[in-house]
Amino acid sequence: MSETYGEKAARLDAIDELGKHREKFALDAGTVYLDGNSLGALPAHVPARMADVITREWGELRIRSWGESGWWTAPERIGDRIAPIVGAAPGQIVVGDSTSVNVFKAVVAAARLSGEDRDEILVDATTFPTDGYIAESAARMTGHRIVPVEPAGMADAAGPRTAAALVNHVDYRSGRLHDLPGITAALHAAGALAVWDLCHSAGALPVGLDAHGVDLAVGCTYKYLNGGPGSPAYLYVAERHQNAFDSPLPGWNSHTDPFAMTPGYEAAAGAVRGRVGTPDILSMLALEAALDVWDGVAIEDVRAKSLALTDFFLECVRAYVPEGRVRSVTPDTHAERGSQVALSCENAPAVMAELIRRGVVGDLRRPDVLRFGFTPLYVGFADAERAARVLSEVLTEGPADLAS
Ligand SMILES: Cc1ncc(COP(=O)(O)O)c(C=O)c1O
Ligand SMILES: Nc1c(O)cccc1C(=O)C[C@H](N)C(=O)O
């Protein structure tokens, strides 16, 4: 008798080297959590660390903590913790602000770094909306014009007038992984800068920022880096650009001597130049603690498990779900797949609501996309099998409003 999918899941979980990391997270056995591509799960040790930050560092040490507890240098210290996960050498990443704000810094800085004869900025036409909104405003301020281009067309679109391109590494709807090395190389060949949004790739797959010569990058930390709701984002400025990096938000935290409090601005050296104002210490220190789960974890292993999980989920969906009820909009090819599977289906809002009611938590992107995010540090093969099985049950038996 051939192996059932449940048996296969148990076999794969038994040999999964990353499976042991699941116990580091606050998860309940009754729920399959497949929404780490929106909000990562809570690492179980973070509440105790935050209790110490609040009661001792804030409550007892108060103002002394800016120095004694390392609060002041947290943005660059935590940047250096994120660096190996995205393939960057130390000193190039600073944590703070939202992704949206860092997109603004990066796009304006890229425009200012490029030659005056270059007057266009290419923007991923399929981008998560905030990047497009911000880039449009940034371009109006710098006197550039925005050219929307699909990532696959970036190489052909880049030319002598292109200052920079802003591209999403993994598409938030389809889960498609774009060719960061190839697009970056093509932009450079055209004399343009490459600015990447890593929200859906950092912590899910190797990015190789330094290896591929990326110029600037931004990303959030509340998805695969598990930093918590609204945890601060980050900005990468390649070392070769740091001296010329001209921030459009040169707040006092990016001054070479902030406590001199002089009227004249003098930019700090290094990643610190990307800072703006007082960092949100509580969120930042929750993120710092959350990053402990990465100790001893290789991103290549995370990638291998992510692909195995999404392969297996798709295999179970094909086996369980009646023909024609869902269509995967996520590429089958590994080289083009991030760490989520997106399925388009009829009545998607009702389907996702019922999945969540039955303990399978994904999310919906209107009008018709069901998203299932696979975070390899805490999602297992049995989760993938159960999610596909419950999806099939929902699609075949109810609820009543699905029949409409
Ligand atoms: C690709 C991408 N960029 C940016 C954002 C959001 O930016 P912010 O952190 O400013 O809300 C998200 C998700 O919210 C995203 O998926
Ligand atoms: N940042 C979010 C939020 O504050 C509330 C709800 C969802 C989000 C998200 O991160 C959405 C996510 N970027 C997406 O891929 O759609």
Image: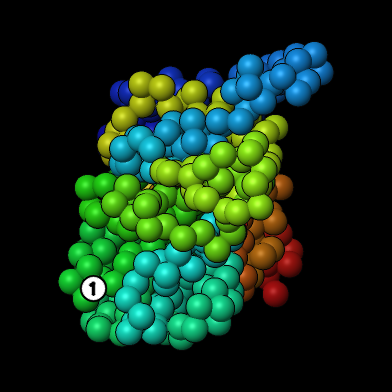
Q: What crowding class fits label 1: few (fewer than 14 Cα within 10 Å), some (14-19), or many (20 or more)? A: some
Residue 148 to residue 334: above or below: below
Splitting the image into 4 quarters, where does residue 80 fall?
Answer: top left
Q: In the image as oriented, which residue stretches furthest toward the right?
A: 59
Q: Which residue is mark 1?
A: 191
* The N terminus - image quarter: top left
- Side of 118 where 262 appears, left or right: right
Q: Could you say where residue 236 lies in the image, as x and y percent from the top left? A: 42, 49
Q: Say if disc 1 is inside 8 Å of ligand 1.
A: no
Q: Nearer the viewer, residue 227 or 288?
A: 288
Is the image coloured rainbow, by chain, by secondary structure, or in one colour? Answer: rainbow
Residue at 35%, 35% (x, y): give it: 90
Q: Could you say where residue 72 lies in the image, as x and y percent from the top left? A: 61, 31
Number of marks:
1
Looking at the rendered structure, the kind of residue marked 1 is Gly
Residue at 76%, 15% (x, y): give it: 61
- Side of 172 where 110 appears, left or right: left
Q: Could you say where residue 303 lies in the image, as x and y percent from the top left? A: 32, 41
Residue 297 to residue 177: above or below: above
